[in-house]
Amino acid sequence: MHGSQEWLRAIAAEEQEFFSKLAPHLVKNGVRMDTVLEGSKAAAAAFDDPNCLNLLINHPPAYGPRILHVNPAPILGFWHVDEVGPAQHSSLRLSEFDPTHVDADKATYFFNGVAGYMIRENVSPIRQADRAHNGLHSARAVVFCGADDGTVPTLSYLNHETMIRTCAEQDRNALIYVKLHADQGKENRRLVMDVCRDYQNVKISEASLHDLIEASDLVVTQNAPAGFEALMHKRPVITCAKSSYWHASLTARNRSDLKQALEFGADLMADFPYEKYFFWTLVRHGLEPAKDDFAKRAWARLRDKVLW
């Protein structure tokens, strides 16, 4: 198990149910789970060991015969195990979503249970402000910033500045919310704040993302997890970068695309099967440690990779 010091501490303290439930099942099947600090000599030795399966936690994309990526899904309590990488780097981005192959009743039951709880209890992977009792003023869109500055050409089509300016200038009488990311760098945070000051209709908000989504007609982001969380509210999402959940969003590769999506996005996504997509992503392609069959399903994924 390769991870940062923070992840290794959490695993040792059994704070992550994924690992605390998986470890006993591995031992039961004759497999020992060890942890190594990512990038260390011990990690390099593990990669060279032909008998070792390397599980990488939130690691940059990498493919190999004995490598699997383990990372939390955008919805708290769910995880993805992938052969290529985490989030926008994952093989999920290359998969085809066919709603006709998803049972509508099962999907609806799952969606209502998960989305209902997350929204009602104000749950998100990143701690949110308390819900606003009186709600927020209605807005045309909310822009959720990402952890990086959005300038990496292989990932993002539009940076934060372009996204905010395009939204603000589409209709200067329409309110636009902007929510900074908790892990956004100081320089990019300062840039975003400077851009927002150029427009009277743009408001930086620290409100709960659930309140911001409910108050907004559309959600705009590069590929932040908040965009996926907006699907719980059945809000049209516009992604401005390569994303693992592009199947459920409108992708804007340039300013013209973004303008069109802002104008017609609500109509284009009106009939999207959000329930089925949620089920497809989190159940078909995900793992839920809280479930009784979690260890069995996780073990099957590992065995399939290395043919144990």
Image (spheres, grey):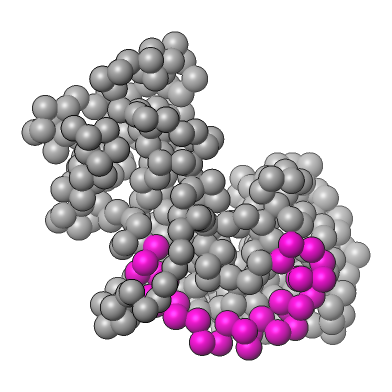
Q: Is residue 191 above or below residue 179?
A: above
**Which residue sits at x=50%, y=55%?**
94
Question: In the rendered image, which quarter is residue 237 located in?
Answer: bottom right
Residue 74 seen: no
Residue 267 seen: yes
In front: 8, or 298?
A: 298
**Which residue sits at x=30%, y=18%?**
50
Specify the quadrant that holds the C terminus: top left
Query: Where does the image place residue 181, in percent across and percent down from the top left?
Result: 63, 53
Question: In the rendered image, which quarter is residue 17 located in?
Answer: top left
Query: Where does the image place residue 201, in percent across and percent down from the top left?
Result: 83, 76
The answer to whether residue 278 is magenta is: yes
Task: Please tell me whether the stretch drawn in magenta is mainly helix, strand or loop.
Answer: helix
In front: 307, or 160?
A: 307
Q: Is residue 71 above or below residue 262?
A: above
**Which residue sits at x=52%, y=37%?**
61
Query: Where does the image place residue 252, in percent across and percent down from the top left?
Result: 71, 66
**Which residue sits at x=83%, y=50%?**
191
Give the magenta range. 252-281
Specify the quadrant that holds the N terminus: top left
Query: Where does the image place residue 225, in percent across and percent down from the top left?
Result: 53, 58
